[in-house]
Image (cartoon, rainbow, N blue to C red):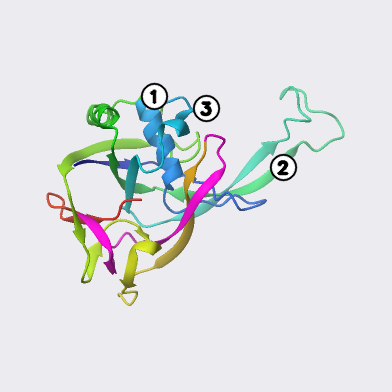
């Protein structure tokens, strides 16, 4: 089986945490559902129907941090479009603007690993990324956060069974972990609950807990199974 590996980065990123209220905060890495959108943009899937293309257990991803997680806030002015019919003419006597602090990732850089049973679309995706082409502009969560990408390679892989501590390069689904070594100098671990599957109406169908090393170091752990990429000397877990 062939895996496609590419790097993805930008000046800013915002992968909105859906269960927040007034102040939008961001996940430290793109959830699987966001990767559906990024891959779909490159392949040219329509934004209204791309989720139908990514059926469960047909596309798999792993995400590796290549730069430390850095967050900051930018005040954003939001306009109540129900009250404002024309932006040039604000209703008098009403406050139609709301200022909200939005949390952003600064200089996010990720390595993305892609597997799929859809061989035709996977080959198409490989060609597009290799030639640095995309049908639609890929973004890191929202349209204001333009993304860049670079083809790393395509590699044959073999699934390994974990029976001892290894260095995991990707984020780690907690359900796949047998034991994690949290006592490592200079490390910073985050436990994040992220969506993994949505239906075509963007309703949550599945979510999981993940362990993330926020300084972009590897995670030392015993896991049930993993994929080793010999040419990159990297161990990853697909979701």
What residue is rendered at 71% in x and 25% in y? Answer: 87
- For the magenta stretch, what is the residue range? 200-227
To which residue does mark 2 refer?
98
- Per the model, the C-alpha gap separating discs 2 and 3 is 28 Å
**How crowded is the residue under tag 3: few (<14 C-alpha within 10 Å), some, or many (20+)?**
few
Closest to the camera, between mark 1 and mark 2, is 1
Total number of numbered discs in the rendering: 3
**Quarter of the image containing the N terminus?**
top left
- Per the model, the C-alpha gap separating discs 1 and 3 is 12 Å
What residue is rendered at 31% in x and 52% in y? Answer: 64
Q: Is residue 12 in sight in this rendering?
A: no
Q: Residue furthest left?
A: 231
The location of residue 51, given as percent across then percent down, is 46, 34
The location of residue 37, given as percent across then percent down, is 43, 35
SS category of the residue bearing label 2 = strand
To which residue does mark 3 refer?
48
What kind of secondary structure does the magenta stretch mostly adopt? strand
Magenta span includes 201: yes
In the shown orientation, is residue 136 left or right of residue 126? right
């Amino acid at each position: 089986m062939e895996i496609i590996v590419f790097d993805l980065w930008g000046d800013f990123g915002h992968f909105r945490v859906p269960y927040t209220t007034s102040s939008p905060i961001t996940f430290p890495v793109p959830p699987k559902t966001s990767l559906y959108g990024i891959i779909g943009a490159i392949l040219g899937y329509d934004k209204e129907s791309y989720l139908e293309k990514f059926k469960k257990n047909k596309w798999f991803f792993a995400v590796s941090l290549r730069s430390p997680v850095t967050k900051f806030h930018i005040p954003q002015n939001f306009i109540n479009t129900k009250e404002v019919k024309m932006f040039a003419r604000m209703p008098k006597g009403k406050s139609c603007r709301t200022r909200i602090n939005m949390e952003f990732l600064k200089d996010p850089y990720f390595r993305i690993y892609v597997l799929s049973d859809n061989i035709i679309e996977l080959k198409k995706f490989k060609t597009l990324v290799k030639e640095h082409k995309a049908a639609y502009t890929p973004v890191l969560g929202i349209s204001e956060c333009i993304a860049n990408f670079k083809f790393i390679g395509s590699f044959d892989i073999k699934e390994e069974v974990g029976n001892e501590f290894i260095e995991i390069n990707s984020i780690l689904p907690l359900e796949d972990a047998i034991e994690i070594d949290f006592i490592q100098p200079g490390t910073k671990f985050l436990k994040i609950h992220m969506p993994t599957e949505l239906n075509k109406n963007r309703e949550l169908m599945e979510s999981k807990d993940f362990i993330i090393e926020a300084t972009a170091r590897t995670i030392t752990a015993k896991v049930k199974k993993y994929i080793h990429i010999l040419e990159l000397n990297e161990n990853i877990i697909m979701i």
